[in-house]
Image: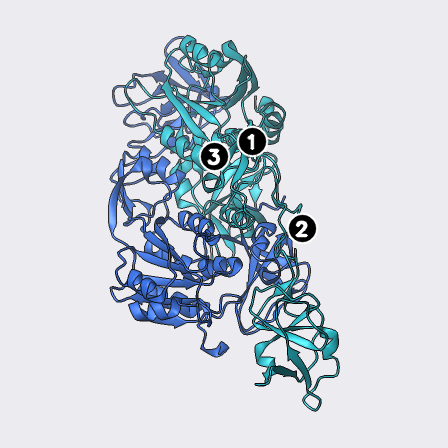
Chain colours: A cyan, B blue
Amino acid sequence: MAGRRATVDAVTGWIEQHVACLEAEPIALARAVGRVAATDVTTTVRMPPVDRAAIDGVALRAGETVGASSYNPLAFALASADVPLPPGSAVTVAAGAPLPAGADAVVPLDQVELSGDGRCALVEPIGVGSDVERAGSQIAPGDRLVPAGRRIDAYHIGVLTVVGIEHVTVIRQPRVRVVSITPPAGAPDTNRPLLEALLARDGARVEAIEVARARDALAQALATDRSDLVLVIGGTGPGRDDIARAALAAAGEVAIDGVAVRQCETACVGRTRSGIPVFLLPGMPAACLWAYELVAGGAVRRRAGGSTALPFAARPMTTARKIASIIGVTDVCPVRCRADDKVEPIASFAEAGLAAAIQADGFVIVPAGSEGYARDSAVMVYLLRPWTGQ
Amino acid sequence: MAGRRATVDAVTGWIEQHVACLEAEPIALARAVGRVAATDVTTTVRMPPVDRAAIDGVALRAGETVGASSYNPLAFALASADVPLPPGSAVTVAAGAPLPAGADAVVPLDQVELSGDGRCALVEPIGVGSDVERAGSQIAPGDRLVPAGRRIDAYHIGVLTVVGIEHVTVIRQPRVRVVSITPPAGAPDTNRPLLEALLARDGARVEAIEVARARDALAQALATDRSDLVLVIGGTGPGRDDIARAALAAAGEVAIDGVAVRQCETACVGRTRSGIPVFLLPGMPAACLWAYELVAGGAVRRRAGGSTALPFAARPMTTARKIASIIGVTDVCPVRCRADDKVEPIASFAEAGLAAAIQADGFVIVPAGSEGYARDSAVMVYLLRPWTGQ
């Protein structure tokens, strides 16, 4: 039985083969934070547009400062900034001002002696390009400002604003249908708010939430679905009331029947006849969470234009104690992070249920072939929230 | 001059002394993602409410299985689940079902021989508590589900839903007023969209955006302000048009005049006479960004109930090349992360402007007293976006 379950890698492979990114749409830059760029965003702008002064000072030709010293101050006539720089001259410039034609360096004001007679003197030489911001040194025409597939953040907004880009092309947000099987009539499915929050995090919108009680009704709902992805919660077990797998088989195809992830063994993956991806998640809260995170979430993020990779920062740390795991299934082991960069395992999701997710700072994934990690092992910790070591 | 500028630690100290967290307000759980808990959220619920079966099987008294073996199968009468378990009996239970009174272990179905005559047989003994989910093992009355000051995420939503909490008390979102000085009349301030996105990330709302041209008008606007925090962009330099500092002095107090962060040296911190925190940020985009991230952002997050700490995951990595920095100021050095867990410095914010923020995977902070890091040094990298090492 365990041998027939698909590994996480096999599920990811299926998703990358069968779940496509949605189409692109234009959006105003002001509303683009969190959306995924559909194409590379490039610019035709040069920043700075011309060579300019990086500081307040005097602009001049560096070559003319050779030999300046306190024993041999070199004098320069102060010229106008509006004409090409005459030989032997300097021009006072403010930070950010264009260099006059001919100038190739800027001397800081406090290293210049300004005399009252329209001249200034230098007591040391200066190098070419000193305190000059070169044209195009920040941004050059053709620069890629956002790569396709990147989630747009505040910094992108800042740079795109600077170069005058007001609209970007992003991937449409997936509309996800959530169908609950587990709750008795009238009772709310406690998994729904969790899934809605996870879907929002991954850039999707919940289009419809329904409760299905009968296999034929669920099959009918799946067969006629027009959303971008469907999550079915509960009813994945082998019991008589477990209608999810049979309904998916009737409405399309069960491509992956069982996943080798602890507690998530009954999760299934498939498609409707019209090709809409369907994920069957177990109804027990911790199982529902990890079936989403390790199985369905990658498809949601891919549909939204992103990557199937887990959306967490990872940090290499060391085990303060042994992390025990079950062989044969991928196991998600919750841990607490310590200031000495070690992690301590806490009660597992099997023992503590969903509560483990709020007690943990992060988690370690133990592959199916491993029984866990001995004390003092190097492990990769996926951080559930920012952890800076303090 | 450099000696008079405040260190980042001194600014953080001022913020922690003078910038208070806002008041609490109730909110529906469905709208609480991203908000900061005002108080510890605790529960009166026990999960599971009673001891229950972790798997499908038969519940019985573990003590009665002692001595069972394939040479000595022990038989149990199958009893009803609705009454206390009679001695010598067992009850078939589904996963999640309460144990009958008296039972203390569950034997998996595939380890039991069910005969047709209302009896079952065991061929090995079982331990007390085996495959039993203990009452309260997941959540016990009094458990703290969200600590005060924690930003509520999808996992909190899941657990709070499970225990039936529908409302939580969170810190009110700060209303932040943004005033631009830099742009000439009619031109938009390109820093504004950046700041709006950063403020949204830190849990604040932009209440009003204005342009101030004259010192007295700005001082008047600050003196009569009723927002929770004010950001003034530009006009922080020593020039004649640099009205920000004088206006703040007229409207209240300049508490910190200059910050020892590279490019952000002219940033100032103070308060209006009615005590509203005011941050003066330099107008150059990269300087505005880092004056926000290292100076103002901590105050915004603190106002919103969070911590002054940087809102990034940090990861210890190694320098692939030397990171050079200027002594005397804290320097933010952008880096790219490599798959071998090394980081390479890229063109600095002084050289590449705001564009460095979108070319980088993260940044290293070099303290004022350091000239940087040699090759192969251990450094802490603040990750601008999730980085998992692939």
Q: Residues within 10 Å of mark 2 (few under 14, many from 20)?
A: few
Q: Which residue is mark 1?
A: A302
Residue A85, image x, y percentages: 68, 70
Residue at the image point whose x is 49% and y is 28% from the top: A174
- The nearer-to-camera label among 1 and 2 is 1
For the residues labelled 3 and 2, the Cα–Cα distance comes to 30 Å
Q: Residue at x 59, y 21 (%)?
A: A4
Q: Is residue A369 left or right of residue B311?
A: right
Mark 3 or mark 2: which is in front? 3
Given the current orientation, which residue lies at the most extreme bottom position? Answer: A71
The quadrant of the rendering that contains the C terminus of chain B is top right
**Where on the picture, by quarter, is residue A117?**
bottom right
Q: Which mark is residue A203?
A: 3
Secondary element under disc 2, as helix, strand or loop, is loop
Residue at (45% x, 77% y) in the render: B4
Q: Is residue B180 visible?
A: yes
What's the distance in space between the residues labelled 1 and 2, CA to CA?
A: 26 Å
